[in-house]
Amino acid sequence: MAVLCAAVVVSSALSARAGDSFKLNRLSLDDIKQGRVALSDVAQPREAERKTFTVNPQPLPVKDMTVVIFLNGKNNLEKIVSHHLDAMKQVGTTDKMNVVVEAGTLSDKAVKRMLINKDGETVYETRQADMGDYKEAGDFLRWARTAFPARKYVFIIWNHGIGWLDPKSDKDGSSSNKGISFDDDTKNYIRNEQMGEIFKIGGHVDVFAANACLTQMAEVAYTLKDSADLIIGSEEVMSGICFEYQKVLGWLAENTTAGNEDFGKEMSRLYGEAYETCTMFGIVCPLKDKGGTLSSIRADKLAALPAKLDSWARAVKDNNEEEAVKYAIGSVIRFAIIPDKDPNKKLAPYVDLGDFALRVDSKSKSQAVHDETARLMSFIDKDLVASQIGVHTDAHGDDYSRTHGIAINMTMELKPVPAGFANAFEGKYSDLSFAKAGQWGQFMDWTTAVWNK
């Protein structure tokens, strides 16, 4: 089963060039890429030749909705591209909704911009392009909005994802915060701080959906707070096929005037259903032994999150809740970045934020912590997260019904953490815009010190 790890926004992993690998406590990128998670060895980016599409359709009448899908298959996911396109064509463009796709594969190195029709497609141009360039994604979104105007826009990026961490090549001295939409042909990818640039080029959208692993976390969502009204994504590893596009587009075609949050709620329902019944190439491949999540976040609430966390963290630290923190670190629901190599999630820095706060609270002896936890959980469950689903209990024993729809970075269980871990990734946590907006990084310094005692 292909998974969308190591690259969203909805997003891809890069192939490693010969000799471009690192070792992480005996875990190499080559080993990892043979498993479920393609934790990519990002080779030195090179500037690809970039051409503007010269063939543009005449603008069409304004419809209720245009769904814009950036389908980057220029990597180890390319075989799934045809599956998704066939699924989209079961619905296609209607009198109320446009379905517009940019799709690329590694085999022919070609990228197509096309209008998806019922049982067919209208291709406007085919040419080489760098799908790891944020300008390409932004230009596609702008092109789609201009050529196929609508009252509402849904933008989906399909590829790999690995949260805020960005694998680093030994030969690449550049610094960034997170990689997304990797292009194996150009050895390029979209950096975290470039995500917002996509929407500065292409325009604000009503809904942004990341069809990729590990993207629905505070550090990633915060970079998109001004780019969309609603952000859809998963805290966990995603199967490459569990956005069942015939069902997603089918619902949208029948509900083009529905509210953003109605769509988000339906997406969560469909995603949970897919974990029981999803198929690829006619083969039923349920994921009943895997934990899964999908949630919708109200982007306009993200600006308030750092301050809410600071108040809660201050109460925990000021009341010296060391035992409560140790309990939470050891029992919280975690999302593994290398699940096949780390089944016990010891080297897994991403946790469900709500579950972590509640676990600290359950062992706390401080009324101030209880009060701050109640305020934080009210904000998460009522204001920030519009809808969410958590399904199954995974092999590690984590019950995903305990998830609350948004993950966050936290002290890892493994101690000591291998010395090479931090050096395996580009950028520092303190460089993130989310980290600069609050004190969560400093709080993690304290929790790590407590855990290592």
Image (cartoon, rainbow, N blue to C red):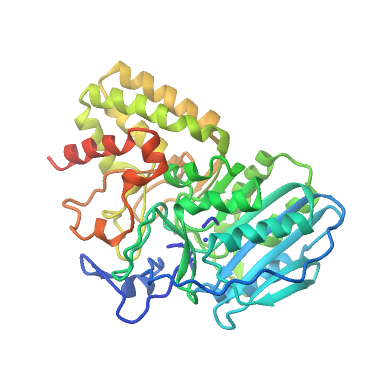
Name the residue at the left extreme. Answer: 453
Nearer to the camera, 6 or 191: 191
The quarter of the image holding the C terminus is: top left
Tell me where residue 126 sits by quadrant: bottom right
Tell me: residue 392, above or below residue 105.
Answer: above
Nearer to the camera, 264 or 153: 153
- Is 84 left or right of 318, judged from the image as shown? right
Tell me where residue 395 sits by quadrant: bottom left
- Residue 228 seen by the camera: yes
- Is 288 left or right of 425, judged from the image as shown? right
- Which x, y percent locates residue 436? 37, 38
Residue drawn at the location 26% of the way across and 54% of the way down? 346
Residue drawn at the location 31% of the way across and 59% of the way down? 425
- Which x, y percent locates residue 368? 31, 17
Tell me: residue 253, above or below residue 445.
Answer: below
- Which x, y percent locates residue 213? 47, 57
Name the residue at the top extreme. Answer: 367
